[in-house]
């Protein structure tokens, strides 16, 4: 079958390593494009990946937030679900840096 993304490669059955938000979920069967590397899972496998993510507590952690003004600086609200998952508390120190056009916030332990 031809790849629906690049339309140049062919889909071959392989095992893929699946991660979500940097958390390893396991290896799952998929069809992978020989040209662009895009992978496709069937509905049953997708449900298994979702179940593992839910069990690990990371399902639904990705969400939008607003950037606000706080004095002369900008502030980002961290949604409660993410704060709870990372055990963040008010006053806890964090290191913030730009990385590949992304904002990275590392919580100091």
Image (cartoon, rainbow, N blue to C red):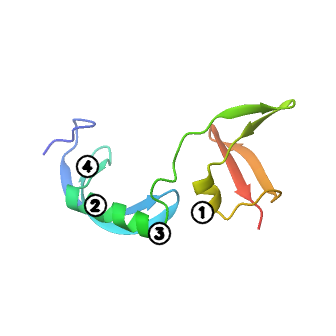
| Residue 44 in sight here | yes
| Residue identifier under label 3 | 56
In the rendered structure, the answer to whether residue 40 lies left or right of residue 82 reads left
Mark positioned earlier in the residue sequence (3 or 4)? 4
| Distance (Cα) linking label 4 and label 1 | 37 Å
The residue at the point 52 percent across, 60 percent down is 22
Query: Between residues 60 and 108, which one lies in front from this camera angle?
Result: 60
> What is the C-alpha distance between the residues marked 1 and 2?
22 Å
CA distance for labels 3 and 4: 31 Å
How packed mark 1 is, by other alpha carbons closer than 10 Å (few <14, some 14-19, many 20 or more), is few
Q: How many marks?
A: 4
Task: Answer with the quarter of the image where residue 89 lies.
Answer: bottom right
| Front-lying residue, 3 or 65 | 65
Q: Are circles 2 and 3 on residues that touch, CB within 8 Å?
A: no
Q: Is residue 85 above or below residue 74?
A: below
User: Residue 67's spot in the image, x, y percent?
Assistant: 68, 34
Q: CA separation, marks 2 and 3?
A: 14 Å
Element at badge 2? helix
Question: On residue 34, which mark appears?
Answer: 4
Q: Nearer the viewer, residue 15 or 87?
A: 87
Q: Secondary structure at mark 1?
A: helix
Single out the residue that lies furthest toward the left: 1
Residue 39 location, x and y as percent? Answer: 29, 51
Residue under pointer 1: 85
Q: Residues within 10 Å of mark 2 (few under 14, many from 20)?
A: few
Which mark is in front, 3 or 4? Answer: 3
The residue wearing badge 2 is 47
Q: Earlier in the sequence, mark 1 or mark 3?
A: 3
User: Of label 4 and label 1, which has the lower sequence position?
Assistant: 4
Q: Residue at x 44, y 60 (%)?
A: 19
Residue located 87% across and 29% down the image: 72
């Amino acid at each position: 079958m031809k790849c629906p993304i690049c339309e140049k490669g062919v889909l071959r059955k392989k095992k893929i390593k699946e991660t979500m938000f940097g958390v390893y979920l396991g290896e799952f069967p998929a069809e992978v494009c020989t040209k662009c590397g895009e992978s496709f899972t069937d509905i049953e496998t997708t449900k298994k990946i979702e179940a593992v993510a839910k069990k690990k507590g990371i399902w639904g952690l990705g969400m939008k937030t607003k950037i606000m003004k706080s004095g002369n600086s900008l502030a980002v609200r961290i949604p409660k679900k993410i704060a709870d998952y990372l055990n963040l508390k008010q006053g806890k120190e964090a290191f913030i840096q730009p990385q590949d056009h992304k904002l990275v916030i590392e919580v100091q332990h």
